[in-house]
Amino acid sequence: MTNKQSLKISITAMFAAIISVSGFVKIPIGPVPVVLQNVVCLLCAVLTGGIFAATPVALFLTAGLLGLPVFSGGIGGIGVFAGPTGGFLAGYFLGAFAAGLIAGKPDIRERKISASLVIRLSLAMLAGLVVMYIPGVIHFSSWALHLSKIPEGKTAFSYAIGACVIPFIPGDIIKCFVAVCVALKVRPVIASYLYSGNTGDDKNQ
């Protein structure tokens, strides 16, 4: 195993730990709480970039499935996936994968911030967020329908959108803005350790 491979493993484990710790930030406002963990998953993916960007999220989810208290609110276990927010956990991985692909591998040349870089990273975060919401809304709709928790006059889908999406849009936009600012500073640093000499030809590998 080369030094760079060892460093990649270490960074993956470190990001998985950061995602886990961010789960302790939780503000309950209903069946779906305000969390920091969703954007941290996307940020870690954008920082590493490429097709393996979701690896830290996969490691984090595996730890949670094994019962470690890494999910939002310091809980764990397979039962969390059956709850109202279970779909968002799957969304964490899918969203991180999408965000990593769009962001691409970090490059040392990103030390010089350009408009195209800002746009690409912003699109990566926003696209990842949208992808993340899809399984979350689908699962929440199914959960509410199964337990007959849908308010009168609403469909399962409209209830899910009102409970899981609309109230969180302003906060998620702010979190994504902060995450992009962090990514602009940190990506070239990661590139200097992992991808020195990267020319961008293999940026999605």
Image (cartoon, rainbow, N blue to C red):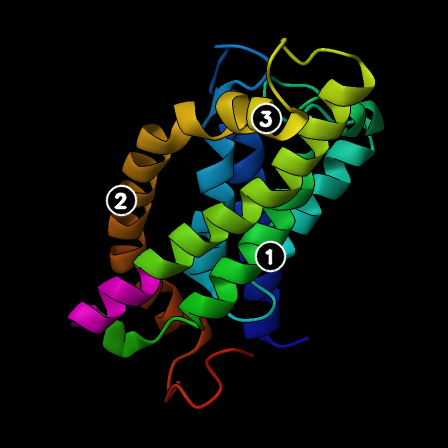
Which circle, 2 or 3, is nearer the viewer? 3
Residue nearest the viewer, comparing 160 with 104: 160
Q: Position of residue 145 (x, y in %)?
A: 76, 21
Asked if residue 72 is among those painted magenta in the image, a careful observer would answer: no
Q: Earlier in the sequence, mark 1 or mark 3?
A: 1
- Looking at the image, do the residues carrying marks 1 and 3 touch, with CB atoms under 8 Å apart? no
Q: Amino acid at mark 1?
A: Ala
Name the kind of residue labelled 2 in the image.
Phe
User: Given contact means CB atoms under 8 Å apart, are the residues at marks 2 and 3 in contact?
Assistant: no
User: Disc 2 on helix, strand or loop?
Assistant: helix
Distance of label 1 from label 3 (alpha carbons): 26 Å
**Residue 160, numbered circle:** 3
Residue 177's spot in the image, x, y percent?
Answer: 26, 44
Q: Which residue is mark 2?
A: 177
Q: Position of residue 100 (x, y in %)?
A: 50, 63
Residue 69 appears left or right of 115: right
Q: How far is mark 2 from mark 3, CA to CA?
A: 25 Å
Query: Which badge, 2 or 3, comes first in the chain's sequence?
Result: 3
Q: Quadrant of residue 186?
A: bottom left
Whether residue 70 is visible here, answered yes or no, is no
Question: Residue at position x 25%, y 72% from top?
Answer: 110
Question: Under tag 1, what secondary structure?
Answer: loop
Residue 135 in which image quadrant: top right
Residue 23 found in image quarter: top right
| 153 versus 143 height, above or below | above
Q: Is 14 situated above or below 183? A: above
Mark 3 Cα shell of 10 Å, populated few (<14), some (14-19), many (≥20): many
